[in-house]
Image (cartoon, grey):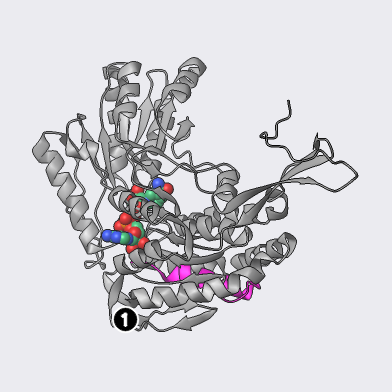
Amino acid sequence: MRVLTHFIGGEHVEGASGRHADAFQPMTGECVSRVPLASAAEVRAAIANAKAAQPAWAATNPQRRARVFMKFLQLMERDGEALAELLAREHGKTIPDARGDIQRGVEVAEFACGIPHLLKGEYTEGAGPGIDVYSMRQPLGVVAGITPFNFPAMIPMWKFAPAIACGNAFILKPSERDPGVPLRLAELMLEAGLPPGILNVVNGDKEAVDALLDDPDIQAVGFVGSTPIAQYVYARGCAAGKRVQCFGGAKNHLVIMPDADLDQAADALIGAGYGSAGERCMAVSVAVPVGKTTADELMKRLVPRVEALRVGPSTDSGADFGPLVTRAHLDKVRDYVDVGVREGASLVVDGRDFRLQGYENGFYMGGCLFDHVTPQMRIYREEIFGPVLCVARADSYETALRLCNEHEYGNGVSIFTRDGDAARDFAARVQVGMVGVNVPIPVPLAYYTFGGWKRSAFGDLNQHGPDSIRFYTRTKTVTSRWPGGVRDGASFVIPTMA
Ligand code: NAD
């Protein structure tokens, strides 16, 4: 069994708290590593180290900071396959899907290479007599990122790449369920030329998170995870006077209009509903066919496809999806399916009892498909985060739109239609942060921003893209006049441009 460490000041540091978590390989169910859980004192030591290193990094010119990311990208190319394998083994997703997890993070590191341009301020010459005004963006200092298990490469990179490019030092607290890849990313950043202490990984649980939230030297916290913890982190971090952005859970709907290409819609639902065993915040978990004929025709296409899904170990590149992340999560997802049956939804495909031959201790289940799901049911209201697709039939476009808008989550949503007018109306009126038109997983590209609405996000700036530069910097505005023989005497009136 591997004994993992923290990564502080450019070095591997053994855990000293005496507490640890077991991390499993989901495809076999084996416990493969011991993850140290940091005490508040260990977190404090990491913050002190980062605080000492940060001023010199902030003073490094932005082009040199960008070059670290350029080198990092080369190293990611060199080590990409090994990382994908490690990720698949720790998380459970298939290797092709793990490559996508890495690539989506790499794209944000590519975005960070543009930091000299992104940090440029504004300038107004002659804003008043002999007066020039300019603004600049300065880093915050030491900032922290707390990340979930489901994208162990992408989400840490979404957080640390813009933060570090802006000149901050970063403390990453990854999920204790699969921290091997985040630790490796920190090693690669060091190899790329990042000074020690600028990217630190502290493993831990609530104790480490609370220590980060309460520490006066942490200026900003970015969190991604489930909604109850997002809300908690947001409240506690804001109470401590920090800048906080927290991204939470989801229940993403895909509306199928009567004029949609139903084969295309079925492909979209199968991939976005069951890929990564449904453990994606942008997974489609609710299909909303509009009209009875659409629903019946869609079900005819979906049922055989769900029955034929290939569940396999993470190392089987031919598998559609792999195991769930832990035994506890598998039990929770199966329990949700039981709840749906008790609530009266029609379980059309039941994957609860699926077992994979040769991998009997792995955390597998097959795809499940519910029809006739109603908004009152828990399986509709709550995030299941497993390979379970709910079909909630709508009698009209307005009903479908209302379902999306009345749901407490508002992360992603899609509409499948051939009608441009309907698509445009939907994009304008839907109360959700990321919208797809004939695209099932509308994750914005790195140079746009990513974030949900309603209880899917707390705080007012999104992740990556231009918002990430705003989040990880403070704006300073300078109004200047050089002595040039102008003398107005003392004025007791607020200066204006009247
Ligand atoms: P989680 O909330 O259990 O954990 C997220 C992080 O919070 C981890 O680092 C964990 O150690 C920490 N944490 C857990 N319990 C805590 C507590 N009581 N106090 C303080 N910190 C705590 O989430 P998860 O199961 O790792 O990830 C899945 C969730 O993340 C899903 O709800 C999914 O929708 C969401 N997610 C959201 C987005 C998004 O951008 N909106 C992206 C990916 C995942």
Q: Which residue is at a point 15% across and 34% down the rendered structure image?
A: 345
Residue count near mark 1 (Cα–Cα under 10 Å), binned few <14, some 14–19, many ≥20: few
Q: Label 1 is placed on what type of residue?
A: Ser
Q: Which residue is at a point 19% across and 29% down the rendered structure image?
A: 374
* Residue 389 highlighted magenta (yes or no): no
Report the magenta residues as a range: 177-196
Could you say where residue 43 lies in the image, as x and y percent from the top left? 40, 73
Which element carries disc 1, helix, strand or loop?
Answer: loop
Majority secondary structure in the magenta region? helix
Q: Is mark 1 within 8 Å of ligand 1?
A: no
Could you say where residue 368 lies in the image, as x and y percent from the top left? 24, 44
Q: Which residue is at a point 84% across and 48% down the rendered structure image?
A: 482
User: Looking at the image, can residue 29 be seen?
Assistant: yes
* Residue 182 highlighted magenta (yes or no): yes
In this view of the protein, which residue sits in the foreground, 81 or 230? Answer: 230
Q: Residue furthest left?
A: 342
Identify the image quadrant of residue 293.
top left
Please state if 293 lies on the left or on the right of 86 as rendered.
left
Q: Which residue is mark 1?
A: 17
Please state if 247 lies on the left or on the right of 328 as rendered.
right
Q: Quadrant of the C terminus?
A: top right
Identify the image quadrant of residue 174.
bottom left
Image height check: is 360 above or below 459?
A: below
Please state if 100 lies on the left or on the right of 76 as rendered.
left
Image height check: is 468 above or below 91?
A: above
Q: Quadrant of the N terminus?
A: bottom left
